[in-house]
Image (tube, rainbow, N blue to C red):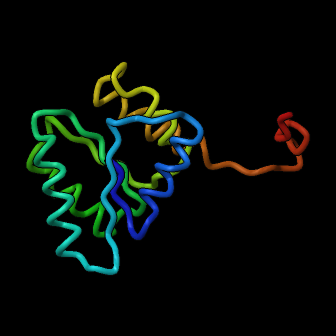
Amino acid sequence: MLATHGGFAEGIFNSYQMIAGTNPQIQTASLTDEGIEPFVKTFKAKLDSLVDEEVLVMTDLKGGTPYNEAYNYYLKHPDKMRVVAGLNLPMLIETGLAIGNSSLNELYELALTAGKAGVDGPTEDNDEDDIEF
């Protein structure tokens, strides 16, 4: 489940699908200008519909409403849910491709590892190594 501010969840999921193909196991929930109450209602309904399944929620910003609501839900269902903040495309691609082949804890660890590894930039030592053709 991707839970973010604005259209980020849908946008990054569209990018995922362009690269990795469709994945019906990934859902989105977005906090929009409609406000917090509609988001919370929709988000909780989606999570409630998955209550018998293990769920990894990836959010954009730790401390933001999507993260806080996911964390509150996690506190009530710690055996079936994990929450990660800092959603980025490498994180989503790696975890999305591993769904079905990995446990919830493995997906959680993969999300953290891939998300961190996906943040990089060129340095004087590796400028030429960063170009991939």
Q: Is residue 34 left or right of residue 45?
A: right
Q: Is residue 89 left or right of residue 110?
A: right
Q: Quadrant of residue 10?
A: bottom left
Q: Is residue 49 left or right of residue 3?
A: left
Q: Nearer the viewer, residue 44 or 58?
A: 44
Residue farthest to the top, as pictured: 101
Q: Nearer the viewer, residue 57 or 105?
A: 57
Whether 116 is drawn above or below 20: the answer is below
Image quadrant in which the C terminus is located? top right
Q: Quadrant of residue 31?
A: bottom left
Q: Residue at x 33, y 57 (%)?
A: 3
Residue 12 placed where, x, y %? 50, 53
Q: Residue at x 28, y 30 (%)?
A: 104
Q: Residue at x 29, y 63 (%)?
A: 66
Q: How many marks?
A: 0
Q: Nearer the viewer, residue 65 or 22?
A: 22
Q: Is residue 118 left or right of residue 48?
A: right
Residue 115 placed where, x, y %? 52, 44
Q: Residue at x 15, y 57 (%)?
A: 44
Residue 45 placed where, x, y %? 13, 55
Whether 41 is drawn above or below 91: the answer is below
Residue 43 placed where, x, y %? 21, 59
